Amino acid sequence: MNRTAFVCTSIAALALLGAAAMVTIAGPLDPPAGPVAPTYKTLTEVEPRIAINATNTPGDADSLFKITQPGSYYLTGNITGVVGKRGIEIAASGVTIDLMGFDLSGIPGMGAFDGVSATVSTLTNITIRNGSVRGWGDEGVDLGTNVADNPAVIDVRASGNTGTGITIGNGGTITGCTAFDNTGNGISAGFGSTITGCSASFNIANGISTSAGCTITGCTAYDNIGNGISIGTACTITGCTAYQNTASGIFTSTGCTITGCTAYLNDGSGITTSNGCTITGCTARVNFASGISIGDGSTISNCTAVFNTLDGIRVTIGCLVLANTCHSNGNGAGNGAGVRATGDDNRIEGNNCHSADLGIVLLGAGNIMLKNTCSGNGINYDIFAGNRYGPIINLTAFNPATVSGNAGASTVGSTDPWANFAY
C-alpha cells in the first residue's frame, strides 16, 4: 500500500469511530412513550423570592413598602425616601431582605423615619443584608431592642442617618457592616449579641455600643465623638482597634474581657474598664489621658502602654498588674507614672517601666510589689507607707564592664527572687 492510500484509509477509519461514538452518546433515537414534558423552569423556580415593589409589598400612610408576611424578599432597584415615610417597614417575623447591593437614600426634611424598620413588638428572625442605607431622618436600619429579637444585619453600609446607623435587638448578629457619620451611635446591639468585622467612624455618639453579654471581634472604631467601643456588663472584646476617638477608645462595664486590642490617640484613656475585668495582650499608645485604666479586682497582663499623657496603667483596689511594658508615659510635668495604684491591696509584679515622669507609684496601703524593673524615670519608685515589696536594688550608678565571651559576673546585686530593680 502506498503512502497516499494509507493516509486515506486512516482518515476513513477515524471518521467511522467518531460517528460510532456520537451515536453512543446520543442515546436511542425513539422518544419515550407518553406526552413530552416541558424542560424549562418557572420564574418562581429561577428566583424563589419576593420582589419588594408596590404590588407585592404595598406601603401605607407611613411607609413606602411594608412587609406583612414571613418570607425571603429582595430589592430590584434603589429606593429614595419621601417626607413622612419609612423606606421599608417590617411587620412580620421570619423575614429576610436582600438589598441586592442597592441604595436606600433618605431626603432632607423627611422627618424621623428609618430606612429599614421593624415596627411590631416581639418580632423574631429578621435578616437585612447587602446594601446601602443613608441619609434617613432617624435610624438607618432599626431592628431595636424589644422589637426584633434574634436579628441579623450583614454587609450593610449605613451613613449620614440622623439616628443610629444600625441598631439590633437581643441575641442578634452584625457582620461585615460599616457605620459612618451618623448622628447617633454608629452601631448598637442589645443583650447577648455578636458584632464581627465591622467598622464605625465619624459618628456623633459612640462608634459601637452594646448592652450586656455581648461579643465584639475584629472591629474598628475611628474618630467617633463618644467612645470608640462602649460595652455593657460581661462582654468580650477581641482583636479590635479604637483610634482617635474623642472620649475613651474602649470603655467597659463590669466583668468584661479584653484581649489583643489596640487603643491609639484617643482624647480620653485608651482602655477604661469598671470592676472585675481582665485585659490581656493589649496596646495603648499616645492617648491623652491614661493608657489603660481599670477598676477594682481586675487583672491586666502582658500589655503595652506607651507615650500616654497621664499614667501608662492605672489601677484602683485589689488588682493584679503582671508583666506589662510601660514606656515614656506622662507629659514631663512630673505626674505621669508607668504604673499607678491609687488604692489598696494590689499586686504589682514583673513590670518594666521606663522613661516616664514616675516609674511605679503606690498611693494606697497593703499593696505588694515584686520583681519589677524601672529605668530612666524621673523617680523610679514612689511608695507610700504601709505597702510591702521585695528589695529595691539600686543599679543606677553601676556601670558594668563589657562582656565579650562565654561568661560574665552577675550585675544585678541580689539573688532575692522578689527583688525589684532601679537602673
Image (tube, rainbow, N blue to C red):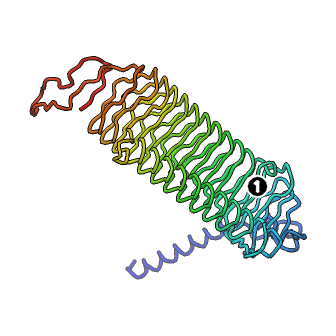
Farthest residue to the top: give it.
Answer: 416
Placement of 218 over or under 344, stated as above or below = below
Tag 1 residue = 143
> In the shown orientation, is residue 351 left or right of residue 230?
left
Q: Judge by depth and name the residue closer to the eye, 12 or 252.
A: 252
Residue 336 position by quadrant: top left
- Residue at horizontal 33 percent and vertical 45 percent from the top: 328
In the depicted structure, whether residue 124 falls above or below residue 129 = above
Count neighbours of disc 1 (C-alpha within 10 A) and say few if under 14, some if 14 to 19, many if 20 or more: many
Q: Is residue 124 above or below residue 388?
A: below
**Label 1 secondary element:** strand
Residue at the far bottom: name it.
4
* Image position of 315 (left or right of 207): left
| Residue at the spot 79% in from the left edge and 51% down from the top edge | 148
120 or 352: nearer the eye?
A: 352
Can the viewer see residue 37? no
**Figure quadrant of the C terminus:** top left
Residue 95 rendering spot, x and y as whole percentages: 80, 57
